[in-house]
Image (tube, rainbow, N blue to C red):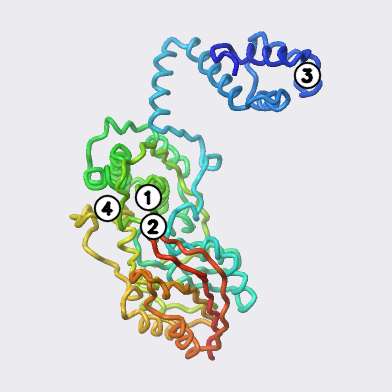
């Protein structure tokens, strides 16, 4: 590489002369004006980023190196032209160190989409297959009921076809996400962007220990990041009176999505990895909302809620093994509720709540009750064959034959299957793992 202390103009001139090219030849081949090129090489003007990219391609030279020269020259120009330029430079250095990402407006910033979060049982890779079968095998596009919505990937896809989509999940963290992504209320994007800019200028070294950092710092999250998480969560709560419900939900959900891949885990919070945590900046980012006027959002016991619902089709994807989602995602539940409960055990969990019958020996009876009470034309039930697993916690509480018998009791059932790699955080082998979709047309 060339001397890193020379300007972008000198660098471009040296590259051109090394390759034995005349300035006019470069101008002709790159469509950059000859006079502009001359002024760039003599330091009378800075090139634009597109011009640098164009020249990097033409010279077959590292675009990254040239862009770095351009950035350094821009900084140097600003520092020299301001009375407090050097102080400003050092401040910028600190902001970069702590993960600053300042935004101007919501539309042009990089955002998290719905499927960005890690979640056990996520149907993101199966959604096209599921919806293709549903569209082929069913009629009606009024109401789609997703009674165990989880990440809401399937519900979001249904919004492309159905006029009304019901989303339900017993977890507080999932419910707040549905409101953030899909609730059709008006909200002030400029207000939210300004708040996020504040969060991205926070210096964790100046933030005091808090509930979150004292409990989870150095375990589930790096210590300084955990202080930021707790501080931001407390700040969101303090702003509750100045935020409407949609804005409050967006900030909370964005916090969850921002910290998801900073967690020192394999994707859930049943345990943390017993290794030193790599230090990374927080870089708070917002979610990409997908407002949907037909969204009906609940946080209720599914077996009770279905007694009040009516629709064309119900999609059913309950938990099938003993792993309770409220325990797997207890940190997110804690963050959303923000009641700061006393925590227990190595995994620092609060007292159990929202424990699903579908993770117990009552699963079969609960499923039979659910499908019997659903007032719909069709049932679409997702199921996987992990009941053959050697792991007791992974073994299904309802077996394949029991699902078939229960569904055949309420309608005519077709069975579809697809090979699918199952999420596995342990050492269990899932050979020939399949995802099944049972499509039942209910009897009149």
Q: Disc 2 and disc 3: Cα gap in Å?
A: 56 Å
Q: Which mark is residue 176?
A: 2
Query: Would you say residue 43 is visible in this rendering?
Result: yes
**Counting other residues with Cα less than 10 Å from the Cα at mark 1, is it few (<14), some (14-19), or many (20 or more)?**
many
- Residue placed at 64% from the left, 9% from the top? 44
Q: Quadrant of the C terminus?
A: bottom right
- Does 183 sit above or below residue 399? above
Circle 3/circle 1 CB separation < 8 Å: no
Q: Which residue is mark 1?
A: 252
Give the residue at x 47% y 69%. 166
- Closer to the chain start, of discs 4 and 2, is 2
Q: Is residue 311 above or below residue 45?
A: below
* Residue 306, label in figure: none
436 displayed left or right of 20: left
Instruction: Characterize the local packing of mark 2: few (<14), some (14-19) or many (20 or more) Cα atoms within 10 angstroms.
Output: many
Q: What is the x, y in percent for residue 96?
A: 42, 28
Q: Which mark is in front, 3 or 4?
A: 3
- Residue under label 4: 338
How far is disc 4 from disc 2 in space, using C-alphas? 13 Å
The percent coordinates of residue 186 (x first, y second) are: 47, 52
């Amino acid at each position: 590489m060339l001397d890193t202390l020379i300007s972008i103009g000198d660098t471009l001139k040296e590259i051109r002369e090394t390759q034995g090219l005349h300035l006019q030849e470069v101008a002709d081949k790159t469509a950059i004006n000859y006079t502009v090129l001359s002024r760039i090489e003599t330091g009378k003007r800075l090139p634009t980023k597109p011009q640098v990219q164009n020249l990097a391609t033409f010279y077959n030279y590292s675009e990254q190196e040239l862009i770095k020269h351009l950035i350094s020259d821009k900084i140097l120009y600003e520092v020299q032209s301001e009375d407090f330029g050097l102080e400003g430079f050092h401040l910028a250095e600190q902001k970069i160190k702590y993960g600053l990402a300042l935004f101007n407006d919501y539309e042009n910033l990089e955002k998290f989409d719905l499927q960005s979060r890690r979640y056990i049982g996520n149907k993101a890779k199966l959604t096209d297959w599921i919806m293709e079968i549903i569209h082929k095998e069913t009629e009606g596009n009024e109401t789609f009921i997703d009674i165990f919505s989880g990440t809401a990937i399937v519900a979001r896809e249904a919004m492309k076809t159905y006029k009304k989509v019901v989303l339900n999940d017993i977890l507080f963290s999932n419910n707040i996400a549905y409101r953030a992504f899909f609730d059709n209320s008006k909200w002030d994007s400029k207000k939210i962007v300004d708040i996020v800019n504040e969060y991205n200028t926070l210096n964790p070294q100046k933030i005091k220990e808090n509930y979150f950092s004292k409990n989870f710092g150095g375990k589930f999250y790096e210590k300084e990041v955990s202080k930021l998480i707790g501080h931001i969560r407390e700040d969101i709560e303090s702003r509750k009176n100045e935020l409407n419900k949609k804005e409050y939900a967006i900030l909370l959900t964005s916090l969850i999505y921002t910290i998801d891949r900073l967690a020192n885990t394999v994707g859930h919070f049943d345990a943390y990895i017993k290794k030193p945590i790599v230090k990374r900046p927080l870089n708070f980012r917002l979610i990409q909302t997908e407002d949907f006027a037909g969204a009906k959002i609940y946080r209720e016991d599914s077996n009770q809620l279905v007694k009040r619902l009516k629709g064309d089709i119900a999609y059913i994807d309950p938990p099938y093994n003993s792993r309770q989602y409220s325990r797997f995602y207890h940190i997110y539940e804690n963050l959303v509720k923000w009641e700061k409960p006393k925590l227990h055990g190595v995994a620092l969990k609060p007292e159990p709540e929202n424990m699903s019958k579908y993770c117990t020996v009552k699963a079969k009876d609960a499923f039979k009750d659910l499908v019997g009470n659903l007032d719909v034309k069709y049932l679409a039930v997702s199921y996987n064959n992990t009941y053959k697993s050697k792991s007791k916690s992974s073994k299904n509480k309802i077996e394949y034959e029991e699902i078939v018998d229960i569904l055949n009791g309420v309608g005519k059932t077709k069975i579809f299957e697809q090979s699918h790699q199952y999420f596995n955080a342990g050492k269990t082998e899932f050979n020939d793992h399949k995802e099944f979709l049972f499509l039942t047309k209910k009897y009149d």
